[in-house]
């Protein structure tokens, strides 16, 4: 699922900090028992992700940072694939379309992310939308927790 995102006209540290805060807020709002323990944040080696401010924000949030080597997107392959889908299915879908401003991109991005998370079928997760897959995963873990007293 896409849980944290931000549309800006400048790709800087504020953008990644806002997207991180958006993701953390979204998780805390929907999952009262949310903990960031064990979560790894994958990113490329851009200056905004290697900054001290972003590193500090990850530590403060309890997240483990992971930056792939330059030119190697293996750690970040799923995110790179998702960004590719976003560009193909929304941003570059109609080559004749001219985006008016960042607000229009933001509005359309919000709609696309809602569709991506709630309706788009993903072959890598049994042809269900991410929200359904996540709900099924949590339900299974709840049952296993009750049955075994731990997650097997």
Image (cartoon, helix red, strand yellow):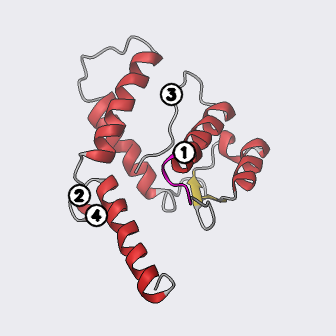
Residue visible at 69% across and 53% down in the picture: 61
Identify the image quadrant of residue 100: top left
> Marks 2 and 4, Cα distance to the nearest angstrom?
6 Å
* Residue 124 in the image, given as x and y percentages of width and height: 28, 63
Label 4 sits on a secondary structure element that is helix
Look at the image and give the residue range highlighted in magenta. Answer: 29-33
Circle 4 is placed at which residue position? 125
Q: Residues within 10 Å of mark 3 (few under 14, many from 20)?
A: some
Disc on the earlier residue, 3 or 1: 3
The CA distance from mark 1 to mark 4 is 21 Å
**How much space separates mark 1 and mark 2, taking CA atoms?**
22 Å
Q: Nearer the viewer, mark 3 or mark 1?
A: 1
User: What residue is drawn where x is 42% and y is 73%?
Assistant: 142
Residue 19 in which image quadrant: top right
Q: Secondary structure at mark 1?
A: helix
Is there a contact, CB below 8 Å, between mark 2 and mark 4? yes
Q: First in sequence: mark 1 or mark 4?
A: 1
Reply yes or no: does residue 102 show up in magenta.
no
Confirm or deny contact between disc 1 and disc 2 (CB under 8 A).
no
- Could you tell me residue 82's position as x and y percent? 38, 47
Which of 58 and 73 lies nearest the eye of the viewer?
58
Residue on which the image places disc 1: 23
Which residue does the numbered mark 2 point to in the structure image? 128
Q: Which residue carries the number 3 mark? A: 7
Query: N-terminal of the two: label 1 or label 2?
Result: 1
Nearer-the-camera pick, 32 or 79? 32
Question: Rounded to the nearest whole Å, what is the CA distance between mark 3 and mark 2?
Answer: 27 Å
């Amino acid at each position: 699922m896409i849980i944290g995102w931000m549309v800006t006209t400048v790709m800087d540290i504020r953008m990644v900090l806002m997207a991180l805060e958006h993701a953390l807020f979204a998780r805390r709002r929907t999952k009262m028992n949310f903990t960031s323990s064990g979560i790894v944040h994958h990113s490329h080696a851009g200056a905004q992700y290697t900054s001290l401010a972003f590193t500090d924000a990850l530590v403060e949030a309890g997240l483990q940072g992971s930056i792939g080597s330059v030119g190697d997107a293996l750690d970040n392959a799923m995110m790179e694939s998702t960004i590719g889908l976003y560009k193909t299915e929304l941003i570059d879908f109609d080559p004749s379309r001219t985006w008016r401003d960042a607000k229009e991109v933001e509005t359309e991005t919000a709609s696309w992310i809602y569709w991506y998370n709630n309706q788009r079928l993903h072959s890598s997760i049994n042809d269900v939308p991410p929200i359904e897959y996540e709900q099924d995963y949590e339900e299974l873990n709840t049952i296993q927790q009750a049955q075994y007293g731990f997650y097997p």
